[in-house]
Image (cartoon, helix red, strand yellow):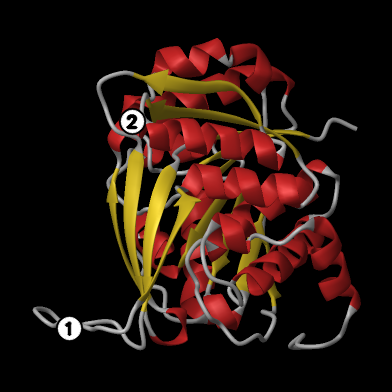
Amino acid sequence: MNTKIVVIGSSNTDLIMKMPRLPRVGETVTDAVFMQTFGGKGANQAVGAVRAGGDVSFVNCVGDDDAGRRMEEQFRNEGIHTEFVFREGGIASGTALVMIGEQGANYISVAPGANYRLTSEHIDKADALIGEAAIVVLQYEIPADALKHALDVCQRHKTRVMWNYAPAREFDRSYLRKVTILAVNETEAGMLSGISVGGEGTAELAAKELLGLGCETVIITLGARGSCVAASGVCEWIPAFRVDAVDTTGAGDVYCGCLAVALAEGKSLAESARFASAAAAISVTRLGAQSSAPFRDEIDRFLDSERGYNR
């Protein structure tokens, strides 16, 4: 079975401040704890996937700076194939500022840096790799033109592609016809579908609308309320796992990376969503994005246990 996963996307250095509560506008909150980790939605998903047992290659641009060199080294240490991590001169690597408050709520600001240097030409250099992949994983922290080109290449190769429409911003919805699996949270689903998602009923309506726009499968995650998995007239709700959240940063990325692994391994859509939900649940009990991603044995043990599962 072909289990190769290609992640095309962003990487950042995350500067994190953990505090008792998030500040209001103009307010300073002291007594924070500082940590520096690696992040970026593409890199987070790649790390989530490789720790869950995936054979993962990453297509990405970093700056020709110390941060870029350290990120590339970290990818290799995780076991990610980095032949298509490109170093760009004259620009800084991506950086994110993350403030984390009560119950894991966060504010995040991102300076994309070299992430916005990723072009169609870079993606073409990985053409053969994309053609061999079981699934390609995309986000939206790269330029729209590069994202569209990646979808075109996947369509040409008939390679399955999962697009995590995050962060939500303007996009040509005609390209949804080229998306095999669309993974979105309620805000992102609302922006793409035009339907405000606030619960199960509206999530199902939004999923139906997005399927009508051409996606083969739509997964809408609603945090502690679980996820809506919809495809070709079938809609199934996957319950969430109950845990005490410490930091929700990167949980959606862990979900997407682990979903890709399960699908590449031939698990059903529902089984894959449960596997991804378990991984995301574990991740929110820890600080950081990549650092919180669980390893395969942790996910398997969690799934084997009834503890915390909302049946």
Viewer-proximal residue among 53 and 272: 53
Amino acid type of the residue that numbered disc 1 sits on in the rendered structure? Arg
Discs 2, 1 touching: Cβ within 8 Å: no
> Separation of disc 2 and disc 1 at Cα?
31 Å
What is the x, y in percent for residue 244? 60, 87
Q: Earlier in the sequence, mark 2 or mark 1?
A: 1
In which quadrant is the N terminus drawn? top right
User: For residue 187, which quarter of the picture?
Assistant: bottom left
In percent of width and height, residue 96 lies at 33, 53
What number is the disc on residue 114? 2
- Seen at 66% across and 55% down, the residue is 231
The disc placed on residue 24 is 1
Q: Identify the secondary structure beneath mark 2.
A: helix
Q: Quadrant of the C terminus?
A: bottom right
Taking the image as shown, residue 84 lies to the left or right of residue 303, namely left
Q: Nearer the viewer, residue 167 or 220?
A: 167
Q: What residue do we see at 53% from left, 43% from top?
A: 43
The residue sitting at 46% across, 79% down in the picture is: 104
Residue 65: image location, x then y, percent: 36, 29
Query: Element at badge 1?
Result: loop
Viewer-nearest residue: 197 or 115: 115
